[in-house]
Amino acid sequence: MNPLVTFPMNRRTFLHHGAAGTAGLALGLTVARAAAATKIPVGLQLYSVREQCAKDLPGTVAAVAKIGYKGVEFAGYYGRSAKELRKLMDDLGLVCCGTHTPLESILPDKLAETIEFNLTLGNKFLIVPWMENKTRQAWLDKAKLFNEVADKVKARGLLVGYHAHAHDFEKFDGVTAWDIFFGGTKAEVVMQLDTSNCRDGGADPVAVLKQYPGRAQTIHLKASGGGPEAVIGEDKVDWPAVFKFCEGPGATQWYIVEHESSRNPLEAVKRCYEALKKLGKV
């Protein structure tokens, strides 16, 4: 048949082709929307812009929202109440994707206050950012504490977790403090790995993640090995492997960007976001 020869199309054929085309378009839009809906949301740890927050918290958080971040994780509250912070986020269309809350704040005498503060924020991730323990038993004791706290906050819809720093990969009898602690905690205790701090401690972020499927419900994405101004993708972290784990067995709910070392923090966190966009993560 000569492909250049055309034949008249009757109404039934026309409607059939039109319906098929419309269905194909609708399917394409549905797939695109589903892909967008399944992307892990990206938040910013406000410690990245701590000096700016101290000078102008509303203006800084507004700048973060303008970049495109969907959430913020607090590391200090700059003298604001939970209600004030919630209004600031609500006005900007942001949500709270975590708080870095001191160990003392989850102890029995402070826990109820901490729970109410975070419920007001709309936050469910209570992440302790720092602990130092000198013995294996001390780490096991902390694991027991976190298990108890996890049980207490679960009824209020909250989770407790711990954030990585380099010293957490110190070894006791051949086992890292990180493994002692997370090996002794329930699955509900969130393992908030920090890709840079992990490497600083001599560990491989991907290997650490793979040991604990389902527990990296939030993760700090931080460049490592590329210099103080390097952002995600300009460094030595195996980002494809990190993303593959988080978007699969990691069950990650939030990617949280952190950048601590730039001379221009707001520009750095903007570049981080743009890097994630190029990688198809936002």
Image (cartoon, rainbow, N blue to C red):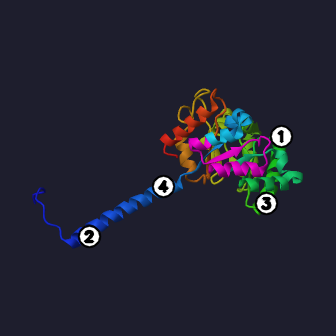
Q: Is residue 95 visible?
A: no
Residue shown at the point (56%, 48%) measured from the top left? 245
Q: Disc 1 designates what residue?
A: 135
Disc 4 element:
helix
The region drawn magenta spans 64-93
Residue 50 falls left or right of residue 275: right
Residue 188: name its quadrant.
bottom right
Local packing at callout 4 (Cα closer than 10 Å; few below 14, some 14-19, many 20+) is few
Q: Position of residue 222 (x, y in %)?
A: 62, 37
Taking 264 as reference, is 31 above or below it? below
Residue holding disc 3:
151
For the residues labelled 4 and 1, the Cα–Cα distance comes to 46 Å
256 over 156 or under it: above or below: above
CA–CA distance between discs 4 and 3? 34 Å
Give the mark, 3 or 1, whose residue is nearer the N terminus. 1
Q: Earlier in the sequence, mark 4 or mark 1?
A: 4
Q: Which quadrant of the structure image shows residue 32? A: bottom left
**Which residue is identified by label 4?**
35
Q: On the image, numbered disc 2 is attached to which residue? A: 15
Helix, strand or loop at disc 1?
A: loop
Q: Residues within 10 Å of mark 1 (few under 14, many from 20)?
A: few
Residue type, mark 2 in image: Leu
Task: Left or right? Give the position of 69 relative to 135.
Answer: left
In the rendered image, which quarter contains the N terminus?
bottom left
Q: Quadrant of residue 16?
A: bottom left
Q: Amino acid at mark 3?
A: Asp
Distance (Cα) linking label 3 and label 1 = 25 Å
Callout 3: 10 Å neighbours few (<14), some, many (20+)? Answer: some
Q: Amino acid at mark 1?
A: Thr
